[in-house]
Amino acid sequence: MTQSHGRHAAHRDPLDAGSGGILRQPMAVWATAGAAVVAFMGIGLVDPILPSIARGLRASPSQVSLLFTSYFLITALAMLVTGFVSSRIGGRKTLLAGLTLVVVFAALSGTSSSVGELVGFRAGWGLGNALFVSTSLAVIVGAAAGGSAAAILLYESALGLGMACGPLLGAVLGDMKWRYPFFGTAVLMAVGFVAISVFLEEQPRPARRTGLLDPVRALGHGGLASAAVSAFFYNYAFFTVLAFTPFVLDMTPYRSGAVFFGWGVLLAVFSVLVAPRVQERFGSLKVLGGSLVLLAADLVVLGYGNHTTAIVCTVLSGAFIGLNNTVFTELALGVSDAPRPVASAGYNFVRWFAAAAAPFLAPKIEEWTDVHVPFVVAAAAAVIGATIVGVRRRALTAEAAEREPQHAAEDGVSVFAR
């Protein structure tokens, strides 16, 4: 994606949903978008109850953080499978298969008697979530009125709402018992399964089936590989905040849920509303590099500040994460000439490994050193990500394919890229 292309892509008004109107959608779209909200809620659901789970299962922070590690490790590996599956059985069946796995493994998570069982069930949950989320945008675009711009805005809004409300649901139900958020998610996803079964018809399958190794081959493109590696280091910083900060704050589920609700609101606002405007003014790569550096500074202050400062910096990090999510997604979808589903799967295959590593390594680093160092390491990772963007600037611009990111879903893109 060239710099001018990034500016042009950002020129759209994020509130312009097309002539059909964003709210005038068929029930199939609302059913899929509603299930997507719950799917994204599942990511931050356990944040407020991590300390409660640790106490309930008599586990250490590093053991409990494996809930994220198993979830995202399976998600990363599933990126090689989701396109393969959906291109063969169709979008509707892929969504329903993913929802079935989430319902089963979320319910089983609530019955866990040991941290090992819970980690295993979260892995199954991650596979189901990957199948669902990687297919949902393409399905929404296929059924939406008002064009792909309206569909993507709906999807981004679902993402932000889910990331914001997940901690709240975890706090409300988890304050009664740490098992209840898992059962609550299973019930909500079961409702989503019924809604999609009733309202969503099968979508057209892509003309070409996706091979298992196609995403890996796509990473041979220098621009896509650069975006993926930079996003890998960014994701390490991102998930240090998401998975390690609850232990540092050490608050009740309600208070922790309120902190991460504020974090999620900023993430949603900056991802959907602010990012397109600042990209238009400064260009995508400048926004990305600057936001990564600011995230690094925020993490250092979070690690060394007092409790109030840590709360403020946790909430503020949502703004930088929202900006980064949007720009990285556009880079991944526009920088190479590979089919978008394949390029996105390759990009996510790389970056989600960091989401698996950070929740495990951050508590371990604290055990080996002190509570400040995990945030210093995360800040360094963000700076490395910014450095890659600067050094590989030419690969991220000059080789870009001239394709609009807002049309990303028109050819069935897998966009578990947030």
Image (cartoon, helix red, strand yellow):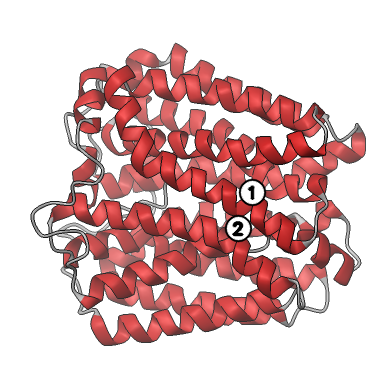
- Looking at the rendering, which quadrant does residue 376 occupy? top right
The image shows residue 416 at horizontal and vertical percentages of 41, 52
In this rendering, which labeled residue sits more in front, label 1 or label 2?
A: 2
Residue 280: image x %, image y %? Answer: 27, 25
Kind of residue indicated by mark 2? Gly
* Neighbour tally class for label 2: few under 14, some 14-19, many 20 plus, Cα within 10 Å: many
Rendered location of residue 177, percent (x, y): 77, 77
C-alpha distance separating marks 1 and 2: 14 Å
At a point 53% along the width and 16% down the height, the residue shown is: 387
Quadrant of image for the N terminus: top left
* Most foreground residue, 88 or 98: 98
Would you name the residue on which mark 2 appears? 44
Return the residue at label 1: 356
Query: From where the camera sits, is residue 412 visible?
Result: no
Question: Does residue 108 appear in the picture of this structure?
Answer: yes
Residue at the image position 36 percent from the left and 72 percent from the top: 95
Vertical arrangement, residue 251 with respect to residue 350, above or below: below
